[in-house]
Amino acid sequence: MVNEIVYVTHEDPVWRPEPAYIALVDLAPFGLDGQQEQVWLKPSADGGLEVACIPFCAYGMALGDRVALADERFVARVVARSGRRVFRVFFTEPRPPGDAREALRTAIAEGGFLAEWQGDRHVAIDVPEGAATSAVWMAVREEIENQTAYWEWADGEPFRTTADA
């Protein structure tokens, strides 16, 4: 029996580039065996490639980071950090009566943050260097305390590949 790869995709990358490149990040080093995230890339001013989406699952990578590829298909390493961070929230099912998703959408919009949703339960939020995230945190704090939502910073682990293991 052949295991099929599960792809984590970005339907609406925040910096939809033209021209666009899509590369893969193997998520096995982050505990997600058999999964790969398709990340959007755009050419950078220095001739390299820059991340044009907000990673949902890959660690150690953020919007605007410059990356290098292996075999023109997989992200091999982060060459230069953009200074941005990714704040991720995952909402559990069933949803509680005090569902915080709309409050979070409002906090994202009012704070001027960029965000990408994967379905309606998982959001990756771009946090530029020096941006205050207190309103975003407060929008989901109660759900996090009640364990109906979970959060993380994407730079909680460094970027790595299976070759790094």
Image: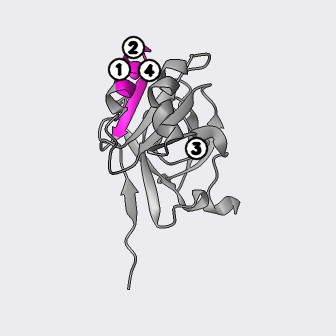
Q: Which residue is mark 3?
A: 68
Label 1: how many Cα within 10 Å (few below 14, some 14–19, many 20+) = some
Find the distance from the CA under tag 3 to the CA under tag 2: 34 Å
Could you say which disc has been placed on residue 106 in the image? 1
Q: Which residue is mark 2?
A: 110
In the visual, does 78 lie left or right of 142? right
Secondary structure under tag 4 reads: loop
Between tags 3 and 4, which lies in front?
A: 4
Find the distance from the CA under tag 3 to the CA under tag 1: 35 Å
Three-letter residue code for mark 2: Glu
Three-letter residue code for mark 1: Thr
| Residue located at (65% from left, 62% from top) | 163
Q: Are marks 1 and 2 in contact (CB under 8 Å)?
A: yes
- Of mark 3 and mark 1, the one earlier in the sequence is 3
Between tags 3 and 2, which lies in front?
A: 2
Could you say which disc has been placed on residue 2 in the image? none
Q: Quadrant of the N terminus?
A: bottom left
Three-letter residue code for mark 4: Phe
